[in-house]
Amino acid sequence: MKRYYQNRFILGAMLAFLILIMITVTGIWLFSYQQMEHETDSFIQNIQSLEQDSRPAFSQSAPPPMFGYIPDQRRYPSGFYDITMNADGTIQSIQQHGILEEAGINVQQVVQQAFDEKRAKGKIGAYKYGIVYKEDETARIILLDISIQLQGLYNVLRSALTVSAALMVILFLILLPVSSRVAKVFAQNAEKQKQFITDAGHELKTPLTVINADLTVLEMDTGENE
């Protein structure tokens, strides 16, 4: 009986904690993702609103000092291409800004795919793009490499899941002695309740037996009578 209540207590507590952890991890990851999307979209729009020779600044504020590091204001969220395309889809010019690692991709093919999709913005691989069509039928494409941001999101998710797993183990170790005491109380209460029902049944059975015997004697003298 004690083992039954102990297992139920541990299972219920860990299930509730797991649901809470999953909600928290999902919320943190979604918030980080939405923040990344907002910052990169804002940067692309800022670039598109300026001339190609201008020097844009990244709108994200510098993080506070931590762990001995003093972060500075970044000029770019990461590397990007500023590309001008002719009306027929051929590339007129490509300007490279920031730190870029092409990782084996063909920039021209990526740009051509983005241009052919005829959308104002979208995603291709680890790149986010925005397109502005001009009056002379040329198009300006900003191709932003978000590999660093994606790696950051992955690190956040991996760290959160690792910490969650560690917390689940710690919770299980804490619940073992606690659940034993709680289960002992429940088992004692269940035994007391069972004993009470047994005793009450016995106490009720004795007078009923006496009454039944008296009725049998009366029936022998007077016959059946309501």
Image (tube, rainbow, N blue to C red):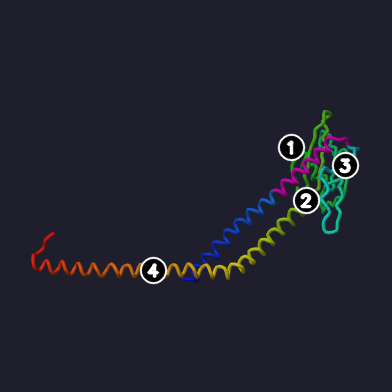
The Cα atoms of the two marked residues, 1 and 3, are separated by 20 Å
* Three-letter amino acid code of the residue under disc 3: Ile
Q: Is residue 88 left or right of residue 12?
A: right
Circle 1 SS class: loop
The residue at the point 76 percent across, 49 percent down is: 125
The Cα atoms of the two marked residues, 2 and 4, are separated by 62 Å
Mark 4 closeness class: few <14, some 14–19, many ≥20 residues within 10 Å: few
Q: Which residues are magenta?
A: 31-51
Circle 2 SS class: helix
Residue 46 placement: quadrant: top right
Q: Earlier in the sequence, mark 4 or mark 1?
A: 1
Q: Earlier in the sequence, mark 1 or mark 3?
A: 3
Between tags 3 and 4, which lies in front?
4
The residue at the point 90 percent across, 38 percent down is: 54
The Cα atoms of the two marked residues, 1 and 2, are separated by 23 Å
Q: Earlier in the sequence, mark 3 or mark 4?
A: 3
Residue 46, magenta (yes or no): yes
Where does the image place residue 149, in percent across and percent down from the top left?
78, 51
Q: How many marks on residues?
A: 4
Q: Which mark is residue 94?
A: 3
